[in-house]
Amino acid sequence: MQNEKKAWWKEAVIYQIYPRSFADSNGDGIGDLNGITEHLPYVKELGVDVIWLSPVYKSPNDDNGYDISDYRDIMTEFGTMDDFDRLLKKAHELGLKIVMDLVVNHTSDEHSWFVESRKSVDNPYRDYYIWKEPKDGHEPNNWESWFSGPAWEFDEATGMYYLHCFTKKQPDLNWENPKVRDEVFDMMTWWCEKGIDGFRMDVISMISKDQAFPDGPDKDGIYGDLAPSVCNGPRVHEFLQEMNRRVLSKYDLLTVGETAKVTIEEAKKYANSDGTELGMVFQFEHVDQLNEKESVIGKWTTAKPQMTGVRAVLDKWACELEGCAWNSLYWDNHDQPRAVSRFGNDAPEWRELSAKMLATNLHMMKGTPYIYQGEELGMTNMVFESIEDCRDVEELNAYRQYVEEHKMVSPETMLACFGAVGRDNARTPMQWNGSLNAGFTSGTPWIPVNPNYKVINAEAALADPDSVFYYYKKLIALRHGNPVIVYGNYEPLMGDSRTVYAFARNYENRRLIVACNWTEYNQPCPLFDGIAGEELISNYTTHKDGILQPYEARAVLV
Ligand code: TEU
Ligand code: CA
């Protein structure tokens, strides 16, 4: 039997808020801090423990706040530091913790450090960023930025290139420079002293670069892949251990690393149970899973993932981290399409059933679950009629590169891919009620509202005891009341089934059996036959012997 170390963040459920799309309090069409504060009772009603706020810092919004120009100030559109302090206080009064997004792989090009850095080669801030001489009059290497185009930008002032793994308005910080680390750790301490409860660390696996800066393997026939030289780099664990010693270990924080390209072997270091680095990491394998014939180009596809592939990944992570590192669990976030559309079935007759099935599957697993705003309503993907409907810089750049410049993909195909896996699916406004703009704003929303808001919205969900919302609420309460769900070890079941995802959790003589039918047909499932146990939750009120009904999910404690 496992003897897992206990921690509050292992027992917690996290709710992610994307402030720009959550609630607009002043009618400018952009969600803001006061909008969040007003809706805290809604979050409390759901029963989660922690709110993770996507970035709220000062930013010119090239990448919706993931490009920070001042770490100690609030984005003008979102409000003021007083608004933030009020939000934090109100949240704490309600017993909700607040986890901040920490974006320190890069800053905005409008951050004062970069404004200085680009001025001259001997500026004191020059080495805060990564500058290279041109190579044969070109970029220093063949790397493609994560968001299309070269990862290097030429700067006239000094005739050199700077590295930007993301957009050219997101120059990468040079973590080799001890002054950069001092600045970051001071800033983190400043937020901790304010009383925040943790950090979600943006692309923290990318802070240490291979200092040889070699060309990467061909990526899309145009550029090379930077990931091998940038993700899980040579000094990343050393840097995180230093961060842990100097900041994290001094507070009782939830820390989760967003670790692009993390492997199990690396995760065991990042999230090691001795606690020398981070509490847990987000892995990407179950959302990045694509075989070559399914990819239109790069990440872009319209193919839906198969349950068997998703299960293989999640089971592997659950089993291999058992006892040595803590897992995080998620179906979606602000970078991913909507869970029910991607993994379930968003047709009206199956949407709620399949959303509940997916929720059961994830929330009964081992690890800390994350819920992305609107997931608890079963919000769905969007249909993008034209590129005019899209806002995400990743989508806009991909469209320019693949459709307009290289003519590799037709506009129709590209838009279909955006509708399937684009980040804007998650960023359409939160659907509060059936009134104009889903009750998100009285003005013009910065991104179109999903037209299905009249049916799918929080007001309707709160009025329906059978809603997806109350199902999530029950799952969260079950986790809080049953240590087997938090600490029980993980045991895959029915590995031969192509349709039913099943597993058990074992803890102190209790055994929890979970089975989820990922299809719209009856499927065989013998697990509950002749078992006398307590049904903790199901999305059906009656069951049939030996089968699971369409999208049926059950969790039974024996
Ligand atoms: O995302 C990093 C990351 O790995 C994602 O780029 C992901 O692979 C991609 O969005 C899928 O399309 C983080 C943030 O979550 C994202 O919103 C930012 O744009 C990015 O870093 C840069 O800060
Ligand atoms: Ca606003």
Image (cartoon, grey):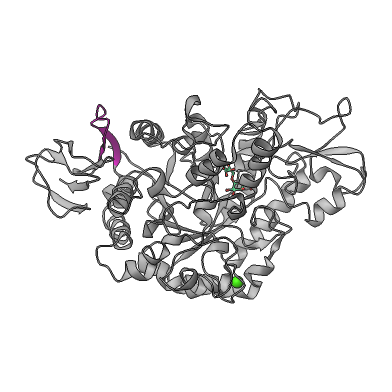
Residue 493 lies in magenta, yes or no?
A: yes
**Looking at the image, is 500 positioned above or below residue 128?**
above
Answer with the quadrant where ligand 2 appears in the image: bottom right
Magenta-drawn segment: 489-504
Query: Do we see residue 517 in this rendering?
Result: yes
- Residue 2: horizontal and vertical position, in percent? 31, 38
Q: Residue furthest left?
A: 530
Q: Position of residue 316 (x, y in %)?
A: 38, 31
Q: Is residue 284 above or below residue 495?
A: below
Q: Quadrant of the N terminus?
A: top left
Q: Position of residue 237 (x, y in %)?
A: 61, 36
Query: Residue shown at 57%/31% (left/top)?
Result: 297
Q: Is residue 503 left or right of residue 234?
A: left
Above or below 78: residue 297: above
Front-most of residues 529 and 173: 529
On the image, which quarter does residue 250 sit in? bottom right
The quarter holding residue 112 reads: bottom right
**Residue at (66, 23) in percent of width and height:** 218
Is 446 or 89 nearer to us in this picture? Answer: 446
Q: Would you say 96 lies left or right of 490 here?
A: right
Q: Is residue 547 left or right of residue 459?
A: left
Main SS of the magenta part reads: strand
- Frontmost residue, 291 versus 494: 291
Q: Position of residue 400 (x, y in %)?
A: 68, 41
